[in-house]
Amino acid sequence: MKKHTADWMRAALALILLCGVISACAGPTASPPPTPEPAVQAQPTPTNPPPTAASPPPTVTPSPTVTVQAPTPTPDPVTGLTGKYPPQPEGVPFPDEDWPAGEWPDGVDRAAIDAVVDTAFGSGGPNRVTAVLIVHGGKLIYERYSPNGADTPTALMPGYSMAKSITSALIGIMVRDGRLSVIDPATVPEWPAGDPRAGITIDNLLRMESGLEFSQGRPPDFGDQGAMVLSGDAAHYAAEKPLVNPPGSEFHYSSGNTVILARILADQAGYGEDILNFVHAELFDKLGIQRFDLQLDRSGTWLGSHAASLTARDWAKFGLLYLRDGVWDGERILPEGWVDYSRTPASTNPEYGAGWWLDLLRPQVFYAVGAFGQAITVDLEHDLVIVTLATDSQTSLPVSEVILNAFAAAD
């Protein structure tokens, strides 16, 4: 196992460059939500030593060990797709280090897809799509990288807010094991009994409806997001924010919600190397993901709002896990009903689930989305995972749309 753990200052500086672009946004209607453009892109520079904690993590009493099933959504009245996930075809192995290759499906306009990808790659300059992968029927049928020499199959590519979807998956694993409940109030030391914030649940945090004040921020002030990471104890910073709306009453996209969830994970699994080992053992190793870069702050908490880099193929594995309803090669990794729960619309925003964006025009499609144009698109109807990685969101947005339309037109 090879893990790359950046120190907290590198994470802080990287976030200062990009924090303004992961701003509150409407979810996708026919494509993932656009993100404002940054002045500078932060590229990950993996290092090996873990961060040195300046102070021990806060003492927290773990949540009671109670098995609570994720809320069961009502099937969509139009598509009926809730709970209907395409199985891995017989004879198609789940990918490990290599992906099973597949033939191009009949009737799907490859020329149209090649054309939009060529345009998005450009000459490999600073504003470009870096990688495009298509997985159909569990097989890798399309894989291209820009002409920029840094964009390769082995390069660790940042997902930015796609990390929020990983955080959601890890919460699901804790729910599977009876270590957390999404419907009970979150155990957060900054919210003692009687504090109005003490009623915030893990479900509220996953659905971006905690009611906590938080400014995602844009250059030049960078808002709470930059200050949160520079504080060295991101979850404490976010948890100290005041309540401005009753929990569950209003959608407000906030990286602060997710770092609080990341600390809740660390309360259960341990801080620093312990949380990294948990992520590897319970998720990445099972998917055959051996190389990754997860950044921690000084407290030893993973910055689960944005700090994850994987190869393009490994991002596709994460999408395939959700396409297969949380089951991988016969093993249930996510609890039964968790993917349904993740893509059930929040009551405060029909375009957001629990760590995943939803598509109002395509109820069978959902997205993990990150700044600069990162997206994992999962299409249940066409047994499809699309990965688009980029340095520029406006350049990347048309790519997944053309691919989705090409497969729909072949029906």
Image (spheres, rainbow, N blue to C red):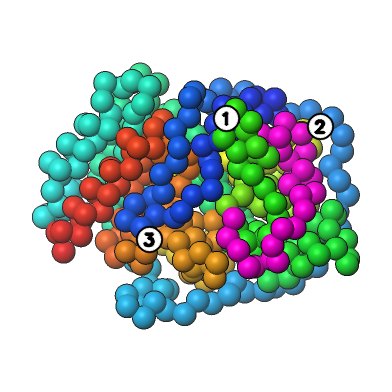
Q: Is residue 240 magenta?
A: yes
Q: Is residue 221 left or right of residue 285?
A: right
Give the residue drawn at x 42%, y 74%.
83
Q: Is residue 11 visible?
A: no
Q: Position of residue 133 (x, y in %)?
A: 32, 42
The crowd level at tag 2 (other Cα within 10 Å; few <14, some 14-19, many 20+) is some
In the rendered image, which residue does mark 2 sit on? 53
Give the residue drawn at x 49%, y 56%.
356
Label 3 sits on what residue type?
Answer: Asp
Q: Position of residue 401 (x, y in %)?
A: 27, 49
Q: Is residue 25 visible?
A: yes
Q: Is residue 393 left or right of residue 234?
A: left
Label 1 sits on what residue type?
Answer: Pro
- Mark 3 or mark 1: which is in front? 1
Front-lying residue, 240 or 96: 240
Which callout, 3 or 2, points at the residue further toward the start of the chain? 2
Give the residue drawn at x 21%, y 54%.
405
Q: Secondary structure at mark 2?
A: loop
Q: CA distance from mark 3 to mark 2?
A: 41 Å
In the rendered image, which residue does mark 3 sit on? 359
The quadrant holding residue 354 is bottom right
Q: Is residue 376 magenta?
A: no
Q: Position of residue 7 (x, y in %)?
A: 69, 27
Front-lying residue, 93 or 117: 117
The quadrant holding residue 45 is top right
Residues tagged 2 and 1 counted as in contact (Cβ below 8 A): no
In the rendered image, which residue does mark 1 sit on? 219
Residues tagged 3 and 2 counted as in contact (Cβ below 8 A): no
Which quadrant of the rendered structure holds the N terminus?
top right
Instruction: Find the magenta span and give its range.
Output: 226-252
